[in-house]
Amino acid sequence: MTFETWIAFAAASAVLLIIPGPTIVLVVSYALGQGWRSALPVSIGVALGDFTAMTLSMLGVGAILAASATVFTALKFLGAGYLIYLGIKLFRSGGTLDVAPRTDAASTAKMIGHAWVVTALNPKSITFFVAFLPQFLDRHGDFATQMVIFEATFLILAFANAAGYALVASRARGMVRSPGAIGLFNKAGGTLLIGAGVATASMRSAS
């Protein structure tokens, strides 16, 4: 794996993580209802959930890599198309984040478990990783080493992203409920995703 590949993976992962989805809605709902104290447990839960989904996905991708070079290459192009699709969808999503504060008394263990379940057991998570990861894997490199590097990178970013959302939601609640701010955020993220997909497809077709 080259340093450029790792940087590309980290950059694409960072953009993908900040897209509001079920996990982010849960993080923000806890933060709005229970304040900054929810940041650490929900961030831990999100990281554990992503670890579960990503490990299962990587094992599946590894099996595809070992079985068929053609299928693995096709999966790379599908992944690039998937990034473009996500970018267009995000760009057109507008400025809504439908979230209600969670005011029920929740222990640290409950918040960790809830965030883990929502993140890990969402079928879209595994589907996403299967489509996303092959773009950055080197078929001729050591798969186990790449798996460790990619998972560690993604989990650190996932933890930081969840913690950031929780802290912002608990300190600047108006921002996460502002259609203008969210709309601008979505358009910027969508543009970056589309660019990442196009760049990835171009690199693969030229190789």
Image (cartoon, grey):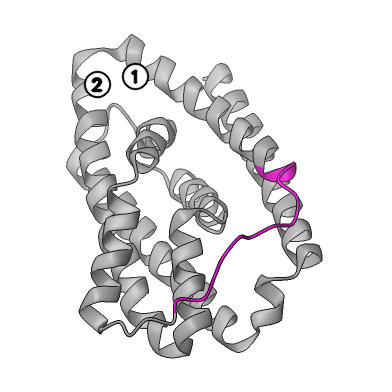
Residue drawn at x 27%, y 57% as measured from the top left? 117
> As drawn, which residue projects farthest toward the front?
104
Query: Mark 1 belongs to which amino acid?
Result: Phe
* Tag of residue 72: 1
Secondary structure of the residue carrying numbered label 2? helix
Query: Mark 2 belongs to which amino acid?
Result: Ile
Rendered location of residue 33, percent (x, y): 49, 82
Give the main secondary structure of the magenta stretch: loop
Front-lying residue, 98 or 70 = 98
Q: Tell me, yes or no, if residue 70 can be seen here.
A: yes
Report the magenta residues as a range.
90-102
Secondary structure of the residue carrying numbered label 1? helix
| Number of disc labels | 2
Residue drawn at x 37%, y 81% as measured from the top left? 104
Residue drawn at x 44%, y 82% as measured from the top left? 103
Q: From what the image shows, is residue 67 above or below residue 148?
A: above
Front-lying residue, 107 or 134 = 107
Front-lying residue, 194 or 204 = 194
* Tag of residue 64: 2
* Tag of residue 168: none
Mark 1 packing: few (<14 Cα in 10 Å), some, or many (20+)? many
Rendered location of residue 36, percent (x, y): 46, 88
Asked whether the beta carbons under mark 2 and mark 1 sit within 8 Å of each other, the answer is yes
78 within the magenta span: no
Disc 2 versus disc 1: distance between alpha carbons? 6 Å
Q: Quadrant of residue 200?
A: top right
| Image quarter (top left, top right, bottom left or bottom right) of the N terminus | top left
